[in-house]
Image: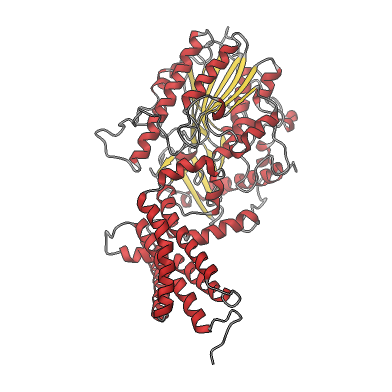
């Protein structure tokens, strides 16, 4: 006699239904991975497909087991079918996501998107007609195939084939790791989403760092208020003889702009002709870094002078309040203050944090700039610069402090109507993602033009001699060159974290050499305060880049994906993948593209840098939570 479940379905029917759900889901997910792998180009193609899809088959098998269990208690098959269709659609969506990020969909990735309204332009840019049709058609195919198969076929052969495919993938991977063409392609987006969701809401998988480092290693992270007994902390910069310190400050933060694609920093693409022309009136820092490659993280050191936080905790949400911005001190000394952003100022609660600081007379997001929206992210960069000049003109003669944070160079790199991407690749081999890169480079050149217009406006108003203009980037942008990575937030490579720092002042920096100090965003506000002759805020953690005694180091961390921590010191960059326990060491003088890991040849140096990272992470764990 056949066993009858509480739902009234016989055990064979329940088993066949669950098995076919797993089989057809596995088939769709294997096809999706095949699309990402590309057309067969070698005899190894089939083996590579098995290697990169066995985890997807494992997930499908797990789903089948859950479906079998669920049918013991459910009255119908509708819920498992709907869940299976959703998983299939998710697998198809992963094709579009991976095609851009070169990483699978994860909970971390969804968190980075945060405001769905803001990112819809970036998402919409990636949705092609074939992808849209597959997103709709694949779940329908799954539903029809399961129903048809349950009614007509036994699943034994199909289940055996699915299990054999999974075993083949595992065996081939262990036998020849070269068959795995790209590590992240082999990950299951479903399993990674569950893993990162669990990690985000528990302490599971969070790395621990032993406190086996010299106690003095933690001293460099102390805020200014705790350094009073250690000697001189401010006043390291002295203006040239007969030159007064600037009264006005303009801080320009370029969205998603690192040094890799700036001609000022040696790029082959002519993107910054105005900054190059003004280099003789500027102090250019050669090795300046974003502490983390994401706007949400960069917002804290750039505006509040503290480290970005840790991938699992950020100020002020963990207990410690953010210190005052530099603008607060300038406002107290009679400066007008403004913060202008042609993007979504409410994203990441930026507006709230700036309003809470009480430091800005004017806070303008894209809504207040009076320009036509060109993407879901906001309006053109020129609108922020035009608003800045109008704001300066509202009260001529009154000293000011302004921050302009641009936005147009963020993906999807929207061009205004009537403007086409410039041809940066004429006579050259096209680089990866050439269409996106051409739009991006065009917009970098446009923001350079806007900076040139700003310099001209300051000269016309006689403000060039008493205004300091600081130009930096919140992070870089990767276009799969030289590493297999798109966008930002995931790695610690130079293309994501090395950003410009240009201090423009014809009075202070006429024909000065480039500065070789290694620094990061946490050092920005102390450096600007040093030039302006203002005291550092007690809660700031950085150091003036003019301080000859400061540690010549920059500490780095990832925001999404693996837990990565790094140190740039001297010619070396050390990266510790705390998720997988892997170390990397690059000699940036001999290997500027970070292609050769020399950690084995320099084990002692790597160990010392790992100690420094342990000191930093342990200090930040306590500091962010208000325990230091």
Residue 537 horizontal/vertical position (percent): 70, 27
Residue 258 horizontal/vertical position (percent): 46, 34
Residue 397 horizontal/vertical position (percent): 60, 8
Quadrant assignment for the N terminus: bottom right
The answer to which quarter of the image holds residue 540 is: top right
Residue at 28% over, 60% down = 40
In the image: residue 401, left or right of residue 126: right
Measured along the vertical axis of the image, is residue 308 above or below residue 303? below
Residue reaching furthest bottom?
1
Residue 431 horizontal/vertical position (percent): 32, 41
Q: Nearer the viewer, residue 29 or 138?
A: 138
Residue at 54% over, 48% down = 560
Residue at 56% over, 60% down = 194
Measured along the vertical axis of the image, is residue 541 above or below residue 107? above
Residue reaching furthest left?
427
Quadrant assignment for the C terminus: top right
In the image: residue 283, left or right of residue 591: right
The answer to which quarter of the image holds residue 180 is: bottom left
Q: Is residue 592 visible to the viewer in this orientation of the structure?
A: yes
Q: Is residue 305 visible to the viewer in this orientation of the structure?
A: no
Measured along the vertical axis of the image, is residue 244 above or below residue 424? above
């Amino acid at each position: 006699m056949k066993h009858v479940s509480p739902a009234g379905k016989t055990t064979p029917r329940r088993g066949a239904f669950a098995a076919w759900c797993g089989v057809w889901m596995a088939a769709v997910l294997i096809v999706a991975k095949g699309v990402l792998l590309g057309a067969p180009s070698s005899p190894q193609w089939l083996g590579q497909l098995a290697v990169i899809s066995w985890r997807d088959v494992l997930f499908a098998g797990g789903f089948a087991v859950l479906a079998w269990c669920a049918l013991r208690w459910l009255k119908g098959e509708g819920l498992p079918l709907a869940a299976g269709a959703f998983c299939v659609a998710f697998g198809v969506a992963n094709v579009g996501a991976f095609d851009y990020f070169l990483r699978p969909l994860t909970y971390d990735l969804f968190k980075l998107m945060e405001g769905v309204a803001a990112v819809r332009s970036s998402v919409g840019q990636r949705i092609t007609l074939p992808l849209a049709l597959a997103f709709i058609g694949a779940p329908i195919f799954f539903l029809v195939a399961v129903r048809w198969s349950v009614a007509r076929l036994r699943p034994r052969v199909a289940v055996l084939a699915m299990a054999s495919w999974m075993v083949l993938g595992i065996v081939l991977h262990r036998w020849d790791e070269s068959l795995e063409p790209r590590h992240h392609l082999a990950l299951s987006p479903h399993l990674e989403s569950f893993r990162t969701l669990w990690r985000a809401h528990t302490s599971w998988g969070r790395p621990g760092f032993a406190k086996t480092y010299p106690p003095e290693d933690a001293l460099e992270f102390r805020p200014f208020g705790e350094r009073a007994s250690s000697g001189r902390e401010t006043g390291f910069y002295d203006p040239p003889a007969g030159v007064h310190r600037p009264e006005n400050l303009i801080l320009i933060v370029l969205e998603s702009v690192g040094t890799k694609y700036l001609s000022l920093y040696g790029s082959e693409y002519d993107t910054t002709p105005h900054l190059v022309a003004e280099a003789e009136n500027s102090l250019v820092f050669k090795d300046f870094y974003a502490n983390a490659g994401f706007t949400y993280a960069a917002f804290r050191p750039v505006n509040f002078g503290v480290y970005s936080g840790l991938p699992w905790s950020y100020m002020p949400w963990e207990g410690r309040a953010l210190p005052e911005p530099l603008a607060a001190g300038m406002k107290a000394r009679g400066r007008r203050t403004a913060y202008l952003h042609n993007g979504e100022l409410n994203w990441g609660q930026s507006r709230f944090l700036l309003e809470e600081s009480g430091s800005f007379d004017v806070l303008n997001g894209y809504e207040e700039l009076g320009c036509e929206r060109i993407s879901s992210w906001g309006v053109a960069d020129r609108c922020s610069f035009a608003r800045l000049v109008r704001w300066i003109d509202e009260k001529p003669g009154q000293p000011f402090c302004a921050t302009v944070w641009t936005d147009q160079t963020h993906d999807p790199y929207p061009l205004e109507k009537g403007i086409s991407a410039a041809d940066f690749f004429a006579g050259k081999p096209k680089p990866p993602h050439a269409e996106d890169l051409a739009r991006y480079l065009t917009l970098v050149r446009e923001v350079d033009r806007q900076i040139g217009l700003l310099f001209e406006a300051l000269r016309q108003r006689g403000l060039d001699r008493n205004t300091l203009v600081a130009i930096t980037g919140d992070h870089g942008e990767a276009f799969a060159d030289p590493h297999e990575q798109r966008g930002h937030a995931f790695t610690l490579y130079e293309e994501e974290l090395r950003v410009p720092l240009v201090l423009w002042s014809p009075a202070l920096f006429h024909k000065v050499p480039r500065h070789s100090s290694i620094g990061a965003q946490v050092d920005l506000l102390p450096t600007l305060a040093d030039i302006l002759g203002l005291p550092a805020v007690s809660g700031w953690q950085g150091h003036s880049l003019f301080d000859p005694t400061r540690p010549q180091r920059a500490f780095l961390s990832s925001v999404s994906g693996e837990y990565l921590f790094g140190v740039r010191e001297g010619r070396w960059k050390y990266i510790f993948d705390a998720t997988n326990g892997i170390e990397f060491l690059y000699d940036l003088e001999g290997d500027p593209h970070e292609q050769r890991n020399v950690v084995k040849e320099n084990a002692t140096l790597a160990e010392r840098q790992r100690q420094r990272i342990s000191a930093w992470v342990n200090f930040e764990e306590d500091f962010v939570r208000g325990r230091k």
